[in-house]
Image (tube, rainbow, N blue to C red):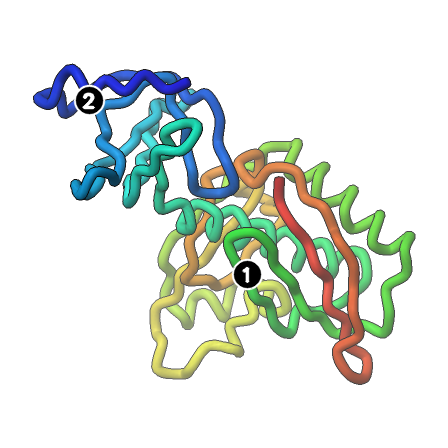
C-alpha cells in the first residue's frame, strides 16, 4: 500500500521512494508518494520520476497522471523508451535476417508493446523463427554498445556497405546522414543509416519473443515480435 504522504505535507516537491511494481508499460507504483491523485474535484499533480543508472546516467520519465485505486499509480510517458527498445531490436532483426537468410528488410512498424518487420524472403518455418529468436537474444545478452554519429553522404556512400546502410533509400536532398552502429567500433555487427531513437546497449532491449510470421504477398514475409 502506497503511503499517501501528500495528506500530511503539501509543501514537499522532491522525495525519494522505492518502486514496488510497474503495471503495464506506463504505470508505476511507489512505496510512498507526494503526488496528489485526481479526486475530490482536484486535478492530479504532474512532475517527473528519475532513476540513477549503473553507468551514471539519469533516466527520467514525465508523470502525466496520478490515479488512486487499490494503490496509487503514477502514469508515465513511457512510449519514447519503448519505441527506442523496439527500434534497436528491429536493427538487430534486420541484421540477423540478412546474415542468416540473405533477406533484406523492406519495411517495419513498431508500437509501444509489439512490432513487425517485413523482408524479402519466401517463407519462414518454425525452425527458422526459433533460430531468429535465439540469435536476437544472444545479441541482447552480449550487451553490445549502440552509438550514432553524423557522416557526409558522399563519404558514407564511398566507405560503408550499401547493403547494410541502405543509403539508396534516402532522398538525394539529404547530404548528411545519421549512422547507427551496434557492436565493436572496428567491426560492428550492424551499421545503418537511421534517424530514429535507440537505447545505448543491446542489453537495454530486454528479452525478445518472436511471436509468428505471416505472408506479405509474393516472396515477402512479416516477422512479428514482442519485448518483455
**Residue 6 marker:** 2
Quadrant of the image containing the N terminus: top left
Left or right: 189 in relation to 222: left
The single residue placed furthest to the left in the displayed view is 11
Disc 2 is placed on an element classified as: helix
- Is residue 46 visible to us here? no
Which residue is disc 1 drawn over?
A: 110
Q: Residues within 10 Å of mark 2 (few under 14, many from 20)?
A: some
Against 117, residue 174 (above or below) is below
Residue 41, x across and y down, in percent:
18, 43
Against 95, residue 104 (above or below) is below
Judging depth in this view, the residue of 163 and 50 nearest the camera is 50
Please tell me which residue is depicted at 36% across the width and 41% down the height of the picture: 75
Residue 130, x across and y down, in percent:
84, 48
- Is residue 54 visible to us here? yes
Q: Residues within 10 Å of mark 1 (few under 14, many from 20)?
A: some
Residue 13, x across and y down, in percent:
14, 25
Amino acid at each position: 500500500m502506497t503511503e499517501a504522504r501528500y495528506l500530511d505535507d503539501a509543501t514537499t516537491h522532491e522525495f525519494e521512494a522505492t518502486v514496488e511494481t510497474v503495471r503495464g508499460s506506463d504505470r508505476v507504483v511507489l512505496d510512498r508518494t507526494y503526488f496528489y491523485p485526481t479526486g475530490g474535484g482536484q486535478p492530479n499533480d504532474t512532475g517527473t520520476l528519475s532513476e540513477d543508472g549503473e553507468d551514471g546516467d539519469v533516466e527520467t520519465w514525465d508523470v502525466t497522471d496520478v490515479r488512486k485505486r487499490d494503490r496509487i499509480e503514477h502514469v508515465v510517458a513511457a512510449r519514447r523508451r519503448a519505441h527506442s527498445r523496439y527500434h534497436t531490436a528491429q536493427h538487430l532483426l534486420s541484421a540477423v535476417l540478412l546474415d542468416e537468410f540473405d533477406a533484406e528488410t523492406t519495411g517495419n512498424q513498431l508500437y509501444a508493446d509489439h512490432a513487425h518487420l517485413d523482408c524479402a524472403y519466401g517463407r519462414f518455418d518454425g525452425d527458422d523463427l526459433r533460430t531468429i529468436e535465439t540469435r536476437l537474444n544472444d545479441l541482447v545478452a552480449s550487451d553490445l554498445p549502440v552509438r550514432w554519429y553524423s557522416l557526409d553522404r558522399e563519404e558514407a556512400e564511398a566507405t560503408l556497405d550499401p547493403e547494410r546502410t541502405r543509403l539508396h533509400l534516402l532522398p538525394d536532398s539529404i547530404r548528411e546522414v545519421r549512422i547507427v552502429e551496434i557492436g565493436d567500433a572496428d567491426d560492428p555487427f550492424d551499421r545503418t543509416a537511421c534517424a530514429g531513437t535507440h537505447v545505448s546497449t543491446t542489453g537495454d532491449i530486454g528479452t525478445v519473443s518472436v511471436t509468428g510470421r505471416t505472408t506479405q504477398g509474393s516472396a515477402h514475409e512479416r516477422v512479428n515480435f514482442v519485448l518483455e
